[in-house]
Image (spheres, coloured by chain):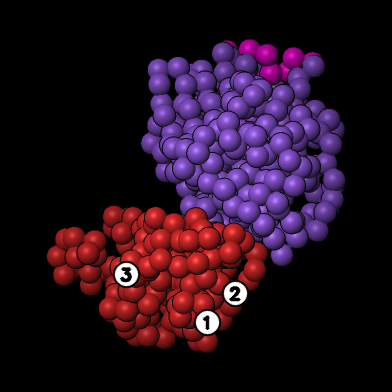
Chain colours: A red, B purple
């Protein structure tokens, strides 16, 4: 079946089987940041943005992306690099396997929540599992990143 | 693995209904549950082109389209104002934001899953399903019906003034609930719903009239009624064990959460 969609800002017209999952579809198009961590729609590693909203690509049919905008970490390199530095400064991650899905959801959160509290941050990111850590370093990194974005002027995080 | 032979984005409900008459066909919700199974689907029917993903509020009711994601219910100001935040509370512990952006209210309710926070919450309210052929059916009746080939179009919540509360017990955050409990006070009478027993959510009947006129009781009377009803629910609500908890533990939770929920709707806080 034909799927007309935008992948990281580029209009694409591709073929997909009726039961191809968006995750496999994107990986086969070179988006290797999108990974299958759990197979049970729990870990958040396969997070991509579908029309701006974070979704689990392991649970979305590729054909449902028809007419929609899909953004993966490959399309957010600048933002990911910027935020990644704050994570690194806190030594937040160990193996880094969960990082792509985590970064995608943090960037989605930045767009959705205005000035979130620590509790709101943890609730928003509860669906991103990290098996190395207790999220303390990540939380510090996010809070620092939020402060930095705020100091850059209002609306900077909404870009 | 889920196998799908054909995918059809339905042009209207009539087409979706026709296609769904075949036993091997399947209407898609958010797919977070469906994709976990090993089903072979002949035709997957997608309702996402029918504009059924919105929440409409009128003077009398909320009309929630079947394709509305759980996240939209969770963040809907009208529903949260009406339920005093209980709607959000019933949803925010379900896996994660990305999951709730996928999972739909229609999929959750139509599936009548035992673990469903969503079904427990809607049973707590004066709610209905609107089926393509079957019309409006009270949620309690729908919850006990067998699955058929009809199509769930909308979930309706009548705006009968109420106070309500929602509690769930989980072994770990974001996991399936071990037990769910909703309570509401409508027209002066209290109602308690227990779910994740682990079977389907049910409203706890009150044959002894313990909660009749709960809203009009004094604080002390409410306290006694909540205690008595919790004790009654402990013995009357059928619970079982599974990998998450034993039946004995669930029975104790029935008592504790019932009392907490009744105290919350009685305006007595939720401690105790």
Measure the alpha-carbon separation of dots 1 and 3.
Answer: 27 Å
On screen, residue B210 versus residue A138, left or right, reads: right
Element class at badge 1 = loop
Q: Earlier in the sequence, mark 2 or mark 3?
A: 3
Res. A33 visible in picture? no
Query: Mark 2 or mark 3: which is in front?
Result: 3
- Residue, disc 2: A37
Measure the alpha-carbon separation of dots 2 and 3.
Answer: 27 Å
Nearer to me, A48 or B218: A48
The residue at the point 53 percent across, 25 percent down is B157
Q: Chain of mark 1?
A: A
Q: Is residue B257 above or below residue B186?
A: below
- Residue, disc 1: A97
Q: Earlier in the sequence, mark 1 or mark 2?
A: 2
Marker disc for residue A10: 3
Q: Is residue A107 above or below residue B48?
A: below
């Amino acid at each position: 079946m034909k799927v007309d969609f935008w992948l990281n800002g580029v209009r694409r017209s591709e073929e997909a089987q009726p039961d191809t999952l968006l995750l496999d579809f994107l990986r086969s198009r070179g988006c290797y940041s999108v990974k299958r961590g759990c197979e049970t729609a729990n870990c958040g590693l396969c997070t991509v943005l579908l029309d701006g909203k974070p979704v689990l690509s392991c649970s979305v049919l590729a054909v449902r992306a028809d007419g929609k905008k899909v953004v993966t970490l490959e399309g957010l390199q600048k933002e990911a690099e910027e935020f990644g530095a704050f994570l690194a400064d806190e030594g937040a991650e160990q193996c880094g396997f969960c990082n792509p899905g985590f970064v995608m959801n943090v960037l989605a959160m930045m767009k959705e929540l205005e000035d979130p509290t620590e509790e709101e941050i943890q609730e928003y990111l509860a669906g991103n599992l990290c098996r190395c850590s207790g999220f303390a370093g990540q939380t510090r990194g996010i809070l620092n990143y939020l402060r930095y974005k705020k100091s850059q002027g209002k609306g900077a995080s909404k870009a | 693995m889920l196998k799908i032979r054909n995918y059809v984005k339905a042009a209207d409900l009539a087409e979706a209904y026709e296609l769904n008459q075949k036993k091997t066909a399947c209407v898609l919700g958010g797919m977070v549950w469906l994709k976990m199974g090993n089903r072979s689907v002949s035709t997957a029917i997608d309702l996402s082109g029918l504009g059924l993903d919105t929440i409409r509020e009128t003077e009398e009711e909320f009309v929630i389209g079947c394709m509305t994601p759980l996240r939209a219910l969770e963040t809907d100001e009208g529903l949260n104002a009406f339920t005093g935040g209980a709607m959000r509370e019933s949803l925010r512990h379900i896996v994660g934001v990305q999951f709730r952006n996928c999972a739909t209210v229609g999929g959750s309710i139509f599936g009548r899953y035992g673990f469903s926070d969503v079904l427990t919450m809607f049973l707590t309210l004066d709610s209905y399903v609107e089926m393509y052929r079957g019309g409006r059916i009270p949620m309690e009746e729908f919850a006990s019906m067998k699955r058929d080939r009809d199509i769930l179009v909308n979930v309706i919540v009548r705006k009968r003034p109420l106070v309500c509360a929602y509690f769930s017990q989980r072994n770990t955050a974001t996991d399936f609930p071990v037990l769910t409990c909703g309570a509401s006070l409508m027209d002066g009478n209290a109602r308690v719903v227990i779910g994740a027993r682990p079977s389907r959510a049910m409203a706890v009947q009150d044959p002894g009239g313990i909660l009749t006129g709960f809203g009009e009781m004094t604080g002390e009377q409410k306290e006694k009624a909540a205690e008595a009803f919790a004790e009654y629910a402990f013995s009357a609500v059928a619970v079982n064990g599974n990998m998450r908890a034993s039946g004995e533990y669930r029975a104790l939770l029935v008592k504790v959460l019932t009392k907490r929920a009744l105290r919350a709707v009685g305006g007595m806080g939720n401690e105790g």
